[in-house]
Image: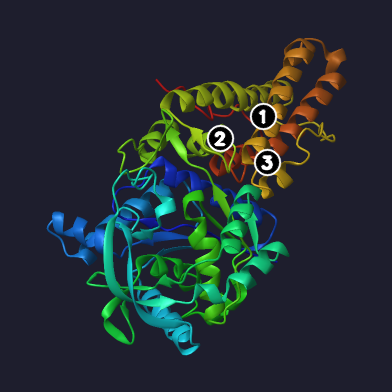
Amino acid sequence: MKYYITTAIDYINGKPHIGHSYEKVAADVLARLARLASKQTFFLTGTDEHGAKIAEYAKAQGLEPQAFADQTYKYFEDAWKNLDLSFDRFVRTTDPDHLATVAEILNKIKENGYLYEAEYSGLYCTGHEAFLTEKDLVDGLCPEHQTKPELITEKNWFFKVSDFTEKIKEKIEKEEFKIWPEAHRKEVLSLLTQGFNDIAISRPNVKWGIPLPWDENQTVYVWVDALINYISGVGYHGDKELFKKYWPATWHVVGKDIIKFHCIIWPALLLAAGIEMPGGVVAHGYLTANNKKISKSIGNVIDPNDWVTKYGSDAVRYFLMREIAFGQDGDVSEEKIKARYDGDLANGLGNLVSRLTNMIEKYSHGEIPDIVEPKDKLDGVVEMIEGFRFHEALARIWEAVAWANQYIDETKPWDLAKDDTNKEKLDAVLSVLGAEVKLIGLSIAPFMPQTAEKIRKSFESDAITKIEPLFPRVE
């Protein structure tokens, strides 16, 4: 069974922030769970490197756009490595196989009769690198960037999205193309019912981009270029066997602000090129800081690397997946991660594993007595993760952590160990706890791979000894 999961690729006009990290960690949790279930898994992430805005940023730093991209993409790749993301490929839209894929796909769409040349006037938001409609604006401004879009008239190549809206609608209604959560599914169906205008797939006068194969005066519109990464990154142009093995994607994980591109334009481009639509799109909410959306344009960004350095990657991963219901907006802060670290992690899981390994070493010669069936406190965790209810899955696991800590307090193994006549009872207590903590270790593996591995190694060693603190105190 195969599982192909992608994230949105990040625009390199700034460094990665905690909002980017949220999406990437969620996709990584799903990829790790799939691998634990022995599914053949491919996890793709990467960077979006073309467009007028990137050329401007490069110029401001005295660099050519390619040199700027070569320097900036590393911030993202390094941040994701620091967060222990298990991606199989980090795709860049300047990669040679991506450039070739874009040309090949657009040639196919043109040959199939779905592109035409026309003049267009529209409201262009530089921040989005996208055209907006009047109904997208609030008080005449782009609601995200708080800027007034510029009225632009230009000649472009257009894509007949409207030829595919009925087909996409039908696929959504039949659940052959899934959109989660339900509110966004309804939103997309409403957009399709209203009718969807054809879109420009190229721009003139934008030098930093992929030229149209048949029109050197036009470059591929940055959004179209970016969407194609989902097939270029899994071998469409080069490794045909890889592409055949993994396409269609199981899930695209994206922010709720770009569902129109992923749920309408992207499926339409694929259908126009004669390629199967993906399995589905998962849309998450925004992270906020002091109840304002975290964004580079507002300037209230939190660098994930700072938190990883201070608390460790597993703690940051845990916090992001536990603090907020995926699909909804949620507020994050250093105070909140510190509270989770001290409470749930150090005093909760860390304390449990430390106490138990210490008692097994002292009272049972470093061996867990014959394993009994654990008290099944972890029922339904896998289904919760598969249903994107990450915070619920972690809450369920931490109920088991709390139960185990309480069980130690109630049974008082240190008292039982004082009298040999209690040996059977002591063995039973350590056995139940050993089984439960092993299960907890397995259950946290998609979320906290390093901690899960430390627990596994500790419990599988020839003689269990008191483990080093899993979550050392942070000053």
Label 2: how many Cα within 10 Å (few below 14, some 14–19, many 20+): many
At numbered mark 1, what does the secondary structure look like: helix, strand or loop? helix
In terms of depth relative to the viewer, which is nearer, 104 or 110? 110
**What is the C-alpha distance between the residues marked 2 and 3?**
19 Å
Q: Amino acid at mark 3?
A: Ser
At numbered mark 2, what does the secondary structure look like: helix, strand or loop? loop
- Give the total of numbered labels: 3
Q: Where 26 falls versus 411 (above or below)?
A: below
Label 1: how many Cα within 10 Å (few below 14, some 14–19, many 20+): many
Q: Where 473 falls versus 314 (above or below)?
A: above
Residue 53 drawn at (x, y percent): 25, 58
For disc 1, the marked residue is 398
**What is the C-alpha distance between the residues marked 2 and 1?**
15 Å
At numbered mark 3, what does the secondary structure look like: helix, strand or loop? helix
For disc 3, the marked residue is 443
Q: Which mark is residue 262?
A: none
Q: Where 67 falls versus 461 (above or below)?
A: below
Can you name the residue that lies furthest to the left here?
A: 62
Residue located 39% across and 31% down the image: 310
Give the image quarter of residue 46.
bottom left
Q: Along the horizontal axis of the image, is 27 left or right of 383? A: left
Q: How is the image coloured?
A: rainbow
Residue 373 drawn at (x, y percent): 84, 36
Residue located 45% across and 70% down the image: 228
Residue located 62% across and 69% down the image: 168
Whether residue 43 is visible to the viewer of this picture, yes or no, is: no
Mark 3 / mark 1, whichever is N-terminal: 1
Residue 186 drawn at (x, y percent): 63, 53
> Can you say which quadrant of the picture contains the C terminus?
top left
For disc 2, the marked residue is 324
Residue 209 drawn at (x, y percent): 29, 71
